[in-house]
Amino acid sequence: MAMPIGLLMTEHRLIERMIALMRMEGEKYRDNKKLNPLFVDAAVDFIRTYADRLHHGKEENILFRELKKKNLSDDHQKTMEELIEEHIWGRKTVKKLVEANEKYKRGDLKSAEAVMEGVIELVDFYPRHIEKEDKHFFLPCMEYFGDQEQQDMLEEEQEFDRSFIHRMYEERVERMEQ
């Protein structure tokens, strides 16, 4: 039987690919001090739509919602609260990145450093966040659920996905990788 965390972990792999592209963009900037604001727009769109609304949406609105109904261990409760706080931090960081990128596009060249600071913060954040979920939280938390509960969550995740366009973002990342 497929577990509801399987879909979330698969999504992590695409997020990691985008983070790798963001890391490369940060290195290009470090080497030649040229900022590509269109890349930043595309990365922000991916993070906001795919990583946050789609992926974190399933985590918060399905998995975490169901976990809150369970008698979690202190460690699992603490980790879930940390993950929620990390999602909030990510949203705030993306918002600052967008603001700095808009200033840059309006001609404030000094804001390029703030743009790259936001990119680097996200590049540093996501691998640690994903590792915490994949290696320390998701699998142990499945023990709180019976087979039918897991199946119900998986079906709810699949329904959640029908309202998003996965393929569009996968193609966008593939184009950017080339």
Image (cartoon, rainbow, N blue to C red):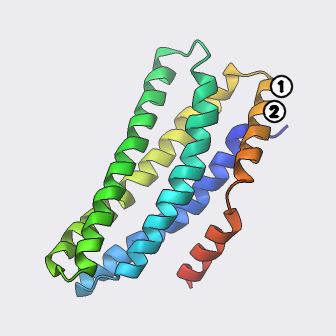
In the structure shown, which secondary structural element does the residue marked by tag 2 occupy? helix
The quarter of the image holding the N terminus is: top right
Q: With 56 as the anchor, is 44 left or right in this view?
A: left
- Give me the disc on residue 148: 1
Q: Is residue 64 above or below residue 177?
A: above
Q: Say which residue appears at 66% left-offset and 70% top-offset.
A: 168
Can the viewer see residue 3?
no
The answer to whether residue 74 is visible is yes
**For mark 1, does the 10 Å Cα neighbourhood hold few (<14), some (14 to 19), or many (20 or more) residues?**
few
Residue 110 coordinates in the image, percent (x, y):
14, 76
Residue 12 x/y as whole percent = 58, 54
Number of the label disc, if any, that sits on residue 18: none
Q: Residue furthest left?
A: 110
State if disc 1 and disc 2 touch (CB < 8 Å): yes
Q: Mark 2 belongs to which amino acid?
A: Gln
In the depicted structure, whether residue 168 falls above or below residue 62: below
Q: Position of residue 44 (x, y in %)?
A: 43, 65
